[in-house]
Image (cartoon, rainbow, N blue to C red):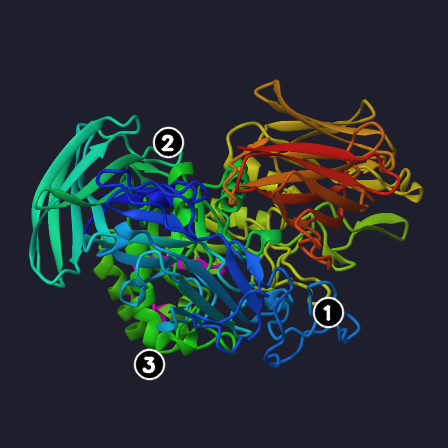
Amino acid sequence: MPANRSVLVVAVAFLLTPLSTPVLTKAAASTLPAVQGAATAEAGPRLRTLFDFDWRFHAGEAIGAQLGGFDDGAWERVDLPHDWMILGKGNREVAAEGRVPTDRTGRLPEQPEGPFDPRSPGGSGNGYLNGGIGWYRKTFTLPASADGRRVFLEFEGAYMNTEVWVNGTSLGVRPYGYATFVHDLTPHLKPAGARNVVAVRVHVKQPSSRWYSGAGLYRHVWLTITDPVHIDQWGTVIRTERVTAERATLSVQVDLRNHSAGAVNARTEVTVRDAAGRGVAAAYAPAPVGADGTGRASLSVEVPAPHRWSVADPYLYDVEVRARVGGRLVDVEHVRYGIRTAVFSADSGFILNGRRLPLQGVCLHHDLGPLGAAAFDRGIEHQLEIMKRMGVNAIRTSHNPPAPALLDLADRMGFVVMDEVFDEWKRNKTRFGYGQFFDEWSERDARDMVRRDRNHPSVVMWSIGNEIEEQNDSAHAEAMATRLAGFVRDEDPTRYVTSAMNDPAPAMRTGFAKPLDLFGVNYNLGIYAQVRGRMTYASETSSDYSSRDQYNLVLKDGTPTIVNRLNNHVTSYDLEGPRWGNSAEVQFAAMRDAPWMAGEFVWTGIDYIGEPTPFNWPNRSSSFGIVDLVGFPKDRFFLYQSQWRSEPVVHLLPHWNWPAEYAGKPIPVWTYTNADSVELFLNGTSQGWRSWKGVQDFHLAWQVPYAPGTLRAVAMRGGKVVAEDRVETTGGAAKLQLSVDRPMIRADGQDLSFVTVRVLDAQGRLVRAGGNNLVRFTLRGGGAIAGVDNGDPTNHEPFVGPTPAAAQHLAFNGLALVVVRAPRSAALLTLEAAADGLTSATAAIRAR
């Protein structure tokens, strides 16, 4: 069991703040000129610069590309984050493992459709997108003031089998595509002012993942210059030893590294500041560091009247850690942290700061829809904003260490996180999966995840694996689980260790579950009662699937009847889950009847590329999401709102555009609501009241004879109207509308604007039935169209256009999304949308 249940967690400042605006240590010593070839950065004893821009990229093998003199002039110029799979630039490298997926006729096309290759070795799991080999190269020069200092290159993640060279010298291979890793470039660099070359080879063998992985340098890269004596990578650890209303006692451990030939007597100083920047606590301690060695300083500070971090009030302090040698400031690191207690109980579930907090969680894969795996901070933030609106308070990083920005945002926005390291151990789930690296790399990868993430207040548990095949291995299960759990506890004894188990009963028999603090149950509703009495939560639930605004109502014997699956879409009435799962409503009932469970993580919050269950080709993305691939809510979104939020909610379905032959025939009408009762009106005539009395489901239902017009739901609570919703019979598509999520973005080459495209009738109403027009997009003023999609899992159009300023895409049930990437200088951007026979639309976005 974790030794300390009152956990203070911190987050490094440059990780917490969106990386599109790099935050570096403030100037406190001599100024260092910016590195040529990197983004601008503040100067100080530690110079940290964003290294994302002006790379050269080549898809495929390139013999000799690691050499400094290699000619890459014909290669494509790209900025990071970059995912070549989503761009359709991969290749079929190996034969597919096992059975090739088939379509309904039992045949697959030979040739790709758009970027989607029906015979991709990654198959449906990878969304029919190819991997292969890709090369990146970048040149840079260092200022004279960098002489005698250390230079490090940090990759937040590169998928996968990534080998890095500097000036022709290999720095090694990192196989795991989700690991953050750092190389010391110092011994291999040329003198100040001379040209240095970094070359990176990424090799994505398929299938290596059960879901869409992406390919390449899909996360940020950083260049950091430090003094020879500096704070070590992930070397600051802060914990809460005691916390009361009057004060919090914090322990601060700082590891220093000395690259010089002589021992030094360093001094470490800590200052704690509140959110307004006022100093509230300080301490210092000596830290002797041997020649070419490491040293550690241990300090204790007391914060008066601590303001606790919570999901409703995610308050963050700033801890400034300074290192001095002989009075000279040699390093500064800013750490954001949140003071909170996080406890699990067998009886009461999850308790945050002394109060029970049911986990209203979702599982999220790492892709960002039309952006692929490219981990733009604003893209992650956009997804989390949607989840917050739904009532989500917990995120599971399925099934790998996330981009650092996700945890920074969770700290800032108020989510608790289940941080997961592996989807498989030694027994592979795919031909080229992690099992091939497990023996050599699992300790390093597990430790690195915990070291990187242990200072985040959002993280409340570490998962050592998802649905691990060794659960059933009586000979090795306990030893392997104990080994990994031990690595995690070595690095952080304060949080709970867990695993998400789809075979919980065998896991208990084999000893797999023995070293776990928390018992995570995937599906298996029948086991909830059996595990009562131990700390348990539902680590993966439901797997309900549906397609946005696809109701699949067909006439059978003259009666409108719901068909679960029709034309490769699943009904949005949300009636079906896979054989291993269940509908959302069945899961809500199960959680209601098991109050000892700490909560749940629903599979999934958002659709993702790959795993198009219950279909294969032509479907290329999942239907599990409560929200579709581009972020548009499905009807199920409002079911979760009604159960997870206290604000009044009423949502009406289906749409109200049905063929003439449906006239007078009964249409199933549902509402999702948290009100006491709902009255339904059709064209002003009441169709009756519904309340929850005697209702076992989590929706209220009517059978309404169809007539065109307006269907209106009026929700009552305590005898008062608290919410309304309506659907109307619309006319045909007449015009387009563009709506930007933010009219002002940062001109930093990293920020994004999400532009919703709506197909409207002449009266300005969304055409949900039949609004599938082909829309052409033109961007003027700079920037780039980074992605476009419509949420239709069967669509095979490219996610990007032929140029950064042009794209086209079908709408799906009246909606599409365009993602605009900011330029690197101030500009007024104009996006125009046009479609044959429709009035066009424009939207302005200012980058500054």
Q: Which marked residue is nearer to the observer: mark 2 or mark 1?
A: 1
Comparing 338 with 55, the one in front is 55
User: Which residue of the protein is positioned furthest toward the front in this rendering?
Assistant: 193
The N terminus - image quarter? bottom left
Callout 3: SS = loop
* Labels 2 and 3: the sequence-earlier one: 2
Residue at 46 percent of width and 65 percent of height: 502
Whether residues under marks 2 and 1 lie with C-beta atoms below 8 angstroms apart, the answer is no
Q: What residue type is labelled 1?
A: Pro
Task: Estimate the spatial distance between the alpha carbons at disc 2 and disc 3, rounded to whole Å.
Answer: 47 Å
Magenta extent? 508-524
Q: Quadrant of residue 497?
A: bottom left
Which residue bears the numbered disc 3? 475
Q: Which amino acid, mark 2?
A: Asp
Closer to us: mark 2 or mark 3? 2
Above or below residue 170? Residue 234 is above
The answer to whether residue 193 is left or right of residue 304 is right
- 800 with respect to 75 (left or right): right
Q: Are marks 2 and 3 in contact (CB under 8 Å)?
A: no
| Image x and y of residue 570, in percent | 71, 55
State the residue position of label 1.
112
Report crowding for label 2: few under 14, some 14 to 19, many 20 or more residues within 10 A (C-alpha): few
Q: In this view, does 381 lie above or below 470?
A: above
Answer whether labels 3 and 1 touch (C-beta < 8 Å): no
- Name the front one of labels 3 and 1: 1
The answer to whether residue 497 is seen in the rendering is: no
What separation in Å lies between label 3 and label 1 (alpha carbons)?
A: 45 Å
Disc ID at residue 313: 2
